[in-house]
Image (cartoon, grey):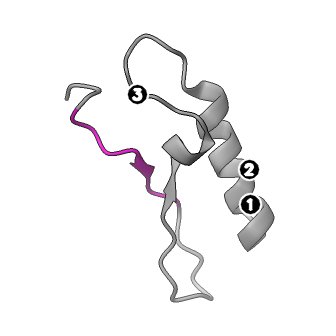
Amino acid sequence: MSPHTSSPYIRLPSIQSRSESVRISVTDFGATGDGIHSDTVPIQSAIYAWCFRWGRT
């Protein structure tokens, strides 16, 4: 899949004690998905933000 057609969202694991759905856009954390720049740090930041908000991975 081309980086230009992929979704900026990542699927995070469900917490069985919660029924709410969580969507975090990695572009909100600086990811570009252009295939030129590294998106590692923005993706890590999105995961850390999820952990901070919902408490676990």
Question: Disc 2 and disc 1: Cα gap in Å?
Answer: 5 Å
In front of the other: label 3 or label 1? 3
Residue 50 belongs to magenta span: no
Quick one: quadrant of the N terminus? top left
Residue at disc 2, secondary structure: helix
Label placed on residue 6: none
- Residue type marked 3: Gly
Q: Are marks 2 and 1 in contact (CB under 8 Å)?
A: yes
- Vertical comparison of 17 with 11: above or below: below
Mark before the other along the chain sequence, 3 or 1 = 3
Residue at disc 1, secondary structure: helix
Residue shown at 53%/63% (left/top)?
13
Q: Are marks 3 and 1 in contact (CB under 8 Å)?
A: no
Magenta stretch: give its range.
5-12
- Residue type marked 1: Cys
Q: Which residue is labeled 3 in the image?
A: 33
- Residue type marked 2: Tyr
Residue 46 position within the rendered picture, expressed as x and y whole percent measured from the top left: 64, 48
User: In the figure, residue 53 lies in which quadrant?
Assistant: bottom right
Residue shown at 52%/44% (left/top)?
26
Residue 51 position within the rendered picture, expressed as x and y whole percent measured from the top left: 74, 60
Residue 5 position within the rendered picture, expressed as x and y whole percent measured from the top left: 21, 35
Residue at disc 3, secondary structure: loop
Q: Which residue is labeled 2 in the image?
A: 48
Label placed on residue 51: 1
Q: Residues within 10 Å of mark 2 (few under 14, many from 20)?
A: some
Left or right? Give the position of 8 relative to 20. left
Quick one: quadrant of the C terminus? bottom right
Question: Disc 3 and disc 1: Cα gap in Å?
Answer: 22 Å
Residue shown at 62%/88% (left/top)?
17
Residue 23 position within the rendered picture, expressed as x and y whole percent measured from the top left: 48, 65
Residue 57 visible from this viewpoint: no
